[in-house]
Amino acid sequence: MDRSNSLGIALASVLVVASALGLASFALASSGPHQAPLVCAPVTGQTDTCNLTLATYPDSGEGAHGTDGGPHPSWVTYSNDNVIVPSNSTIDMTIDQYDAEGSLNDTSYDQILGTIGGTATIDGKTVSDLDDDYLGHTFTLRGIPGSGAKLFVSVPLPADDNSDDSVVLNGVHYNKPVVVQFSFKTGSKGIYEFNCEFPCGGARSGHFGEAMSTFGYMSGTFTVN
């Protein structure tokens, strides 16, 4: 089997799983991103690979909201909601996860899907799934419903329990983050969306909303150029 057919079959498998997870119901509460673009950084000497780093915080005092947390200071947040990456490339992604634990609404999201090799590394340890009762967030990337886009990646982010080791950001102490790393491939140009499928904020009561579905917090746009 040639490489293009192999990749096509793998992608089809991921999309079947994505459909089973009910991704068609995904909808964001805002019309678009508002933060300055975070552009994937090319790797020296490699024309088709770049590095991308995001972070998840337990409040909105980091990222673009300002140290007062903006309109929703208690909402958890990604560090950026406006990501730009190149087409037909390998994205080597790092997520620094600073938030605590909880249980998923949908335990299917404890699986790692759409990454190269179907794995990620958690503080250097390679895994293919995680305990769904001990997660902080997910990074879930998919096409906008109805767009026909064929990219899906979902990686659970474990809870940060590094209470014996802390870092200071803007004068605030946080636990040292859990470092999650994984790689995936982009295809053709398009605009995609990412969000957290963990019950963040008001969604902890069982509904999808608040931080999970709002640009600038746990949702954003992922542009493939």
Image (cartoon, grey):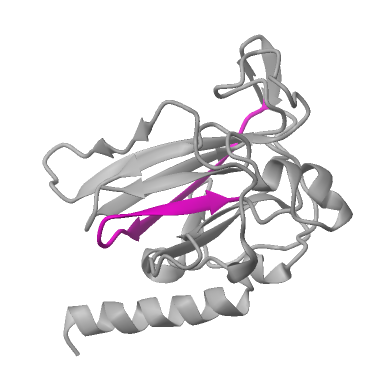
Residue 69 appears in view: yes
Of 162 and 111, nearer the camera is 111
Tell me: 164 left or right of 95. Answer: right
Residue at 56%, 24% (x, y): give it: 63
Total number of numbered discs in the rendering:
0
The answer to whether any part of residue 159 appears in the image is no
Q: Position of residue 5 (x, y in %)?
A: 23, 84
Q: Quadrant of residue 104?
A: bottom right
Quadrant for the N terminus, please. bottom left
Q: Quadrant of residue 19?
A: bottom right
The image shows residue 189, relative to residue 30, as above or below, that is below
Is residue 191 left or right of 164 when viewed as pictured?
left
Give the residue at the far top of this rendering: 171
- Asked if residue 35 lies in the magenta stretch, the reply is no
Left or right of 38: which side holds 97? right
Q: Is residue 215 above or below residue 35?
A: below
Q: Position of residue 187 (x, y in %)?
A: 27, 62
Report the side of 135 relative to 124 (left or right).
right
Please, what is the dominant secondary structure of the magenta stretch? strand
Residue at 54% across, 31% down: 79
User: 99 or 149: which is nearer to us?
Assistant: 149
The percent coordinates of residue 64 (x first, y second) are: 55, 22
The residue at the point 27 percent across, 82 percent down is 6
- The residue at the point 66 percent across, 71 percent down is 108
Query: Considering depth in this image, is 118 or 57 the residue closer to the camera?
Result: 57
Say if 152 sits above or below 6 in the image: above
Range drawn in magenta? 175-195
Measured from the top left, where is residue 153 in percent x and y? 47, 62
Furthest-right residue in view?
205
Of all residues, the one furthest to the bottom in this rendering is: 1
**Nearest to the observer: residue 184 or residue 187:** 187
Q: Would you say residue 182 sits in the magenta stretch?
A: yes
